[in-house]
Image: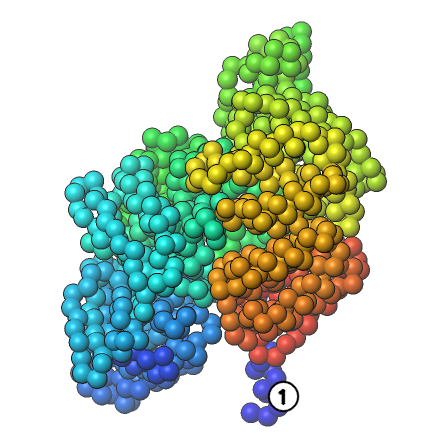
Amino acid sequence: MDMLDAQNAAAAPPPVIHREDYRPPDWLVPDIALDFTLDPAATRVKARLSVTRNGVHQRPLRLDGDGLTPVAVRIDGEPQADAWRMDGPALLIDLPGDAHEIETEVEIAPEANSQLMGLYASGGNLCTQCEPEGFRRITFFPDRPDVLSRYVVRMEADKARYPVLLSNGDRTGGGDLPGGRHWAEWRDPFFKPTYLFALVAADLVANRDSFATRSGKQVELAIWVKPDDLPRTEHAMAALKASMAWDEKVYGREYDLGEFNIVAVADFNFGAMENKSLNIFNSRYILADPDTATDVDYDNVAGVVAHEYFHNWSGNRVTCRDWFQLSLKEGFTVFRDQSFSADQGSAAVKRIEDVRALRAAQFPEDAGPLAHPIRPESYIEISNFYTATVYNKGAEVIRMLHTILGPEKFRAGSDLYFERHDGQAATCEDFVTAMEDASGVDLTRFRLWYSQAGTPRVRATLTHEPAGGQARLTLEQEVPPTPGQPAKQPMPIPLRVALYGEMTGEVFGGERLVMLEDQHQEILFEGIGERPILSINRGFSAPVTVVSERSAADLAFLSARDDDPFARYEAMQQLMVDTLVGAVARGSADHRPVIDAVQDTLRNSALDAAFIAEAVLLPSESFIGDQMAKVDPVAIHAAREALRRDLGQELEDEWRASYAKTHANRYEYTPAAKGLRRLKTVALGYLAASGAEDAAIIAHRQFRDADNMTDRQGALATLANSPWPERDEALAAFYDRYRDNGLVIDKWFTTQALSTRDDTVDAVEKLAKHPDFTLANPNRIRALVGAFSVNQKAFNDASGRGYRFLADMVLAVDKLNPQTAAKLVPPLGRWRRFDEGRAALMRKELERIVATPGLSKDVFEQASKSLG
Ligand code: PHE
Ligand code: ZN
């Protein structure tokens, strides 16, 4: 190849995979036996596959590989040098009969695996990550989720170095070998796709417990961690047992094996992985104790433990036919973990948090160049589709089914789905059909939620005719165009609606579930004797943006009286957003309505602290930006800070009272104590914003005297935003105290990356050179780079330094870990939302990324689509 050819080859865009092109596999592999001789530098993997021809065809057996070179290939026990050939990274074998036995042998180097896909080393231990396409980095196999096999896994390793050997299913053998080595054999009786395979060879200790299923089966539970971390596993264990009981009670699903293992590792691309009976976790979603984990961390641990456990049915027993169906398991499982968490604590606060997360991550995705339906139509790299859309909007779509069908019919639908498809690789269509068949409800139009991208906008107008006692609700919907989908059909949108009487404060006739089916629809309410106030999309019954012109007075009314806690929160948010958007547009705004509404909420003794803390928090700078035609990060920051200062000053007595009320509390992990801690730090933030002279002292005292991480980190965040001299001292003290705990040092990076100070870009550039910053650990990258890129003010610094920093990081990380690099790209794709100057600077960085030779297809896809 000469230079020009080499360049052209490098520039040829990677192939696009289309959902429509799905074809069943040519060959099935009902059984596989794997034999690992483990070593960090050179691991031998022998695989024996029994393959059967699927259907009538003459096509060869294609075994996917990624970076593998066959050491040996045998067919039906014989070495067959000319029956196989390489086709790029894949191994092709021509087979005469309909059933054969294929043996392959390869050598891999886990310690050189920086992608963290396949078999890799983390903290001196060996572990695997196979979803979505990591198995092909371990051995040759048809690496697709519709090929289901029974696995027998034998592994041998140095006993002192790797005393613990784990895989899926049940341990069926093991023992010592000469030379200080040992072996273990595991068998998984359930058919599973490659992506659920897992293996761990490690020096870890276990927190052991057990769970008796409702049919009386005893399940041995173990959470494997480094010895020092053992005391931090209690919360995860409690969450695991609670999840097992919850899935029995709410979905009728029992655990199906004698063992359930969880392993925590420090280096992990995502949150956690649901490998059959051997979940592997990012340690940040397992480890928690009061000194090192915040209340939010505790909630995340419980939520992710539940999520992975629930996958045993929604994902493993019934898996996905192809990766376009990812939301089948992820949307459903997120809905299940959200419902579980809602049942464990405050359902209202959980719903507020989930909607806030959806609006922070998914709404911008739906409004930008990477928008895709929850069931995408095409991809270059499937790893790029583990998105807020597939997960969180996917969960909202399942929640809408739950709302439309009601809990009983929904449960009948899920029962039918599990029964019908147990042991199969299913599709989103199968799920909807099961819901339809079990409920008798026609879901033909509902399927649009799977195929259309974009967040629908619903305009709601309420008019009142006092004479006839009628109210008319006019609803109009519009689904914005998204890449590849210029014109949209109207979606079926379930809206929970109530009308409140302005004088009496009563709800007319209770709440109604309105199904908006058409582009335009009118709903008549009778017996409305006084002016009604509209409460709509209660509980956030649909993932849409509602536009309704409600006066500040009406929003204040709802924020004080609505009996749906979400709607109540939402009314306050709307009031705040209207005020802030007005302030940015006109340079100033009347803060009085917000101040009065916040005061009412703070003084309302019927509300719990957790709800109050959520309700009085101003919307984030990015959320305010999302409501505007063009984002002006400087003006948004100024407007929000001005409102924060006024709220702080005008309500200083209330903040002091809230702080005092919550301050004395000793640490306890209960919903009530969590709520008080949340309110305490929110109050501290407003006191700091007020400019009160003693705010620095209060913050520093909270930091110094804290008996838990929630209080300590809350105070540190306030200090980190401040110009106070206590700031640097606190950051240094925090670092010194936790220098040996990577997860806490992540917080130290994040707190500084999120700072609202003017010198944050400098600070972040400097932190990237800190000895504790490393590109090898995804948590650390996200802690600094990921956090910085959502700091709207600092990231969008008019100089473009923030953009350049991010692009530099993308390119540096891409050389080691393309998946993690690709996840950093989307903030640069928001360029259309900004002024010309910033847009040009962002585009320049995206162009620089795309033009870089040797780019991964992961980053290529995200960056090139972001330019589009
Ligand atoms: N399937 C995992 C989950 O959602 C996420 C994941 C995807 C983990 C890819 C690792 C790699 O539970
Ligand atoms: Zn999942």
- SS for tag 1? helix
Front-lying residue, 401 or 578: 578
Q: Is residue 404 left or right of residue 82?
A: right
Q: Residue 516 in the image: x percent, y percent?
A: 54, 31
Q: Residue 100 in the image: x percent, y percent?
A: 20, 75
Identify which residue is drawn at 32% across, 72% down: 141
Check the picture and name the quadrant holding the N terminus. bottom right
Specify the amino acid type for callout 1: Leu
Q: Residue 452 in the image: x percent, y percent?
A: 54, 47
Front-lying residue, 214 or 163: 163
Identify which residue is drawn at 67% across, 68% down: 766
Q: Is residue 787 left or right of residue 217?
A: right
Q: Eyeballing the image, is 566 above or below 809?
A: above
The residue tagged 1 is 4
Identify which residue is drawn at 65% across, 21% down: 557
> Quarter of the image holding residue 795?
bottom right
User: Would you call the spot at circle 1 few (<14 residues within 10 Å), some (14-19), or many (20 or more)?
Assistant: few
Check the picture and name the quadrant holding the C terminus. bottom right
The residue positioned farthest toward the bottom in the image shown: 2
Q: Eyeballing the image, is 567 above or below 481?
A: above
